[in-house]
Image (spheres, rainbow, N blue to C red):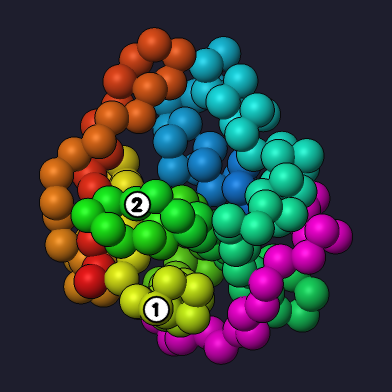
């Protein structure tokens, strides 16, 4: 598919409703293929609502980067600085691209910008993230970008553990 050039910028408080809506849409599209259970509904409405996104935008330990075209949000990434894995202090908590714009280079552009932010903030462009082990599309994308699989992490949803892969790009 042809690359789409889209400006990237830091999110502003006014972006919170669009980020929340895109986050819910991508999360449900990716993980609710069997329908929407109570656990899924609660998780999405608790963790991807406008208020929560506004708190992330205001959090000095985080950066939200948005990709938009013609004032329409296409993708976003949430970076968290601090803690980390193996001394890597920048985690990509979220990298969501609207499914209609996947495979157009937007995810790669967001990843590149995330590494620039990591370098500026931490003095090192290394980043880490976790991805659902049953998301072959995301795993393939990150492996193509040079990420290395360093093991597993669990994600609990309503008492059920879901396997995530921990990936590093040093």
Q: Which residue, given by chain and number where applicable, does mark 2 sit on? A: 84
| 35 or 9: nearer the viewer | 9
* Residue 8: % across, % down: 62, 80
**Is residue 167 visible in this depiction of the protein?**
no
**Residue at 61% of width from left, 20% of height from top?**
42
Secondary structure, mark 2, is strand
Crowdedness near tag 1: few (<14), some (14–19) or many (≥20) residues, C-alpha within 10 Å: few
In the rendered structure, are the residues bearing label 1 and label 2 in contact, judged by CB atoms less than 8 Å apart?
A: no
For the residues labelled 1 and 2, the Cα–Cα distance comes to 14 Å
- The part of the image, by quadrant, that contains residue 123 is bottom left
**Is residue 10 covered in magenta?**
yes
* Residue 67: % across, % down: 62, 73
Q: Is residue 98 above or below residue 105?
A: above
* Quadrant location, the N terminus: bottom left
Please state the extent of the stretch shown in magenta in the rendering: 1-18
Q: Is residue 89 above or below residue 56?
A: below
Q: Which residue, given by chain and number where applicable, does mark 1 sit on? A: 123
Query: Mark 1 vs mark 2: which is more N-terminal?
Result: 2
**Residue at 22% of width from left, 54% of height from top?**
86
């Amino acid at each position: 598919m042809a690359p789409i050039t889209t400006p990237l910028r830091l999110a502003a408080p006014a972006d919170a409703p669009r980020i929340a809506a895109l986050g819910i849409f991508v999360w449900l599209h990716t993980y609710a293929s069997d329908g929407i259970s109570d656990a899924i509904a609660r998780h999405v409405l608790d963790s991807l609502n406008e208020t929560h996104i506004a708190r992330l935008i205001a959090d000095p330990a985080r950066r939200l980067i948005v990709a938009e075209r013609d004032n329409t949000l296409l993708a976003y990434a949430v970076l968290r600085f601090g803690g980390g894995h193996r001394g890597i202090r920048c985690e990509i908590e979220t990298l969501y691209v609207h499914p209609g714009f996947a495979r157009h280079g937007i995810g790669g552009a967001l990843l590149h910008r995330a590494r620039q932010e990591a370098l500026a903030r931490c003095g090192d462009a290394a980043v880490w993230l976790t991805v659902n082990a049953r998301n072959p599309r995301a795993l393939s994308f990150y492996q193509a970008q040079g990420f290395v699989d360093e093991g597993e992490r669990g994600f609990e949803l309503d008492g059920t553990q879901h396997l995530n892969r921990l990936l590093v790009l040093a």
